[in-house]
Image (cartoon, rainbow, N blue to C red):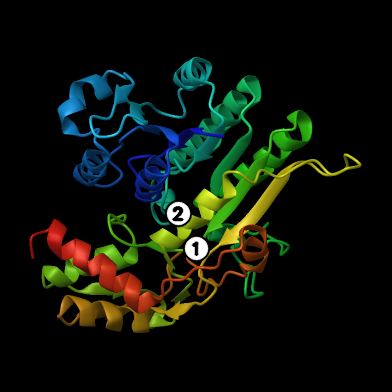
Amino acid sequence: MKKVLVTGAAGFIGYHLCRRLISEGYDVYGLDNLNDYYSTDLKWGRLEQLGTGSEFFEEINNGKLVKSENHENCSFVKADLSSRESVEDLFRAQSFDVVINLAAQAGVRYSLENPHAYTSSNVEGFLNILEGCRHTSVKHLIYASSSSVYGANAEIPFHTADRADSPVSLYAATKKANEMMAYTYSHLYGIATTGLRFFTVYGPWGRPDMAYFKFANLMRNGKQIDVYNNGNMSRDFTYIDDIVESIKRLIPRPPKNSDNGDEAPANLFNIGNGSPVNLLEFIEILEKELGMKAEKNMMPMQPGDVEKTWADVDDLFEYIDYRPEVGIEEGIQSFVKWYKEYYGI
């Protein structure tokens, strides 16, 4: 189980996961389309940390598989999951043991503006991944779902056994579709799949469209921050290192068929901190670490948003013997330290 494909490798979670797996001796292949949903400078910066940076720009943009200069067990290719031919060629050429699909068109609010990007990447792209796994006998597919699948579910904390059939955004609907597609392939073809419902991941090298990063940028430039639902929001913030540790522990633990064959080899877990934080409290911690006050623009609830997220992570803890360890103050402190270094503050 040593040859691993990580899609979305230039993304936030993908980058951190690749770094960890490289250090653990896995043979890591990263894939990303390097789209401009947010600054490609940040994505190239992550790749430079992995040793496959801008010096390989021409080769990467030609779709070539590029070896890292710093790590002999790391390679990267620029490709789009929605390209069936590209995905098929990569799977045939490499015969991966494990696939970790983190590539997706992210963002709840952006799905209101550009819905087709979500079906192309999150549905068609994921189908291409499933087909690649099916035809090359991949031993374990781990894929990113989202806490957004709980949608209008009012029962908290969220448990994977709860109903998740009332999505309030197209992004959430595509993530629920991924779960159903994965289960179907597990049932039909015996592919071991593990879905992860991520809860508000944050930390260094994060996504600038996420609230904490966006707030830091606005505060640094003396601009107002939009605080939705007048601050009556809570999120189950999960630090990136806890996410990576959990995924690493899941890799060698693919689900198995039940003895009687009635159940498909498919697992589904919440992956969160299990401790929601109020948005205004979160802003206070960010203000303290940045050493500046935020000018708040109180706003109503936005379409596609939910008031509170809270993960029940007991089943994941029992499965991998690990519970998130990084608290919100420590996590924000680490983010701000990186943020100041990256922007030269």
Looking at the rendering, in which quadrant would you find the C terminus?
A: bottom left
Instruction: Look at 50% across and 68% down and name the residue there.
Output: 324
User: Compared to 178, does 79 lie above or below?
Assistant: above
Q: In the rendered image, which residue does mark 1 sit on?
A: 199
Residue toward you, 174 or 300: 174
Can you tell which of label 1 and label 2 is closer to the viewer? 2
Q: Quadrant of residue 70?
A: top left
Give amino acid for label 1.
Answer: Phe
Q: Residue furthest right?
A: 260
The crowding category of the residue bearing disc 2, from other C-alpha atoms within 10 Å (few below 14, some 14 to 19, many at least 20), is many
Q: Amino acid at mark 2?
A: Val
The image position of residue 109, as x and y in percent, is: 40, 56
| Residue 244 marker | 2
Compared to 291, does 332 lie above or below?
A: above
Q: Earlier in the sequence, mark 1 or mark 2?
A: 1
Query: Relative to 59, is 317 above or below?
Result: below
